[in-house]
Image: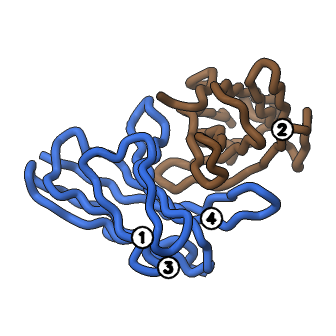
Chain colours: A brown, B blue
Amino acid sequence: SQQGEEDPQALSIQEGENATMNCSYKTSINNLQWYRQNSGRGLVHLILIRSNEREKHSGRLRVTLDTSKKSSSLLITASRAADTASYFCATPYGGATNKLIFGTGTLLAVQP
Amino acid sequence: NAGVTQTPKFQVLKTGQSMTLQCAQDMNHNSMYWYRQDPGMGLRLIYYSASEGTTDKGEVPNGYNVSRLNKREFSLRLESAAPSQTSVYFCASSAQTGGFEKLFFGSGTQLSVL
């Protein structure tokens, strides 16, 4: 079964609004990553948060991690039409740092 | 910069046919991966290779074989294609940095099995 599950499955907002998407995972991890996928393209790494971190920022991205709840959230502030994409969380699985399992993704549509 | 290159980009097969998806990376990465992406399922790991000469099963390995030909190349073979293998296939590579793997993806192969 999938290691990570994102919600919502789809999100539609207006340009300038903030977008929040959530990821839940099942086993203990030492890090969690978020990736973005534009339509018809491969995934691109956005940001990583380690298990000893609670929050991390990168530009308009803010990631939080709650290891007690086995969940993470990705916040995109002041969204732009170019942020329209699918967003996935990924976690190491089975104790192997190079075996990454992806969640089901959140499809974000930002309306101009 | 080429990054991760997958061929072909599109392929249509008949049930029972075989084919090999090719992947090459020019970033000198140790690890390489094959994922499949289906609507509503996200990405699922088929096989991965932590280093040249090693391969390991992922979440959904049945019906597939892989070969890590050298450090640059990692191929995925379907011996007898089935309609359930209709999917978009992504190859990725990674290098471990600070205890984690950052993946770099190819642009995908859209495979249809009729």
Disc on the earlier residue, 3 or 4:
3
- Assign a secondary structure to mark 4: strand
The disc numbered 2 marks a residue on which chain?
A
Disc 1 target residue: B74
Q: Are marks 4 and 1 on the same chain?
A: yes
**Spatial separation of the CA atoms under disc 2 and disc 4:** 20 Å
Disc 4 target residue: B94
The disc label shown at residue B100, or none: none
Residue B35, horizontal then vertical, whole percent: 44, 51
- Residue type for callout 2: Ser
**Spatial separation of the CA atoms under disc 2 and disc 3:** 31 Å
The disc label shown at residue A51, or none: 2
The disc label shown at residue B72, or none: 3
Q: Are marks 3 and 4 in contact (CB under 8 Å)?
A: no
The disc numbered 3 marks a residue on which chain?
B
- Residue type for callout 4: Ser
- Residue type for callout 3: Arg
Residue B75, horizontal then vertical, whole percent: 36, 68
Q: Are marks 1 and 3 on the same chain?
A: yes
**Spatial separation of the CA atoms under disc 4 and disc 1:** 13 Å
Residue displayed at 47% across by 28% down: A1
**Spatial separation of the CA atoms under disc 2 and disc 1:** 31 Å
Residue B30, horizontal then vertical, whole percent: 59, 71
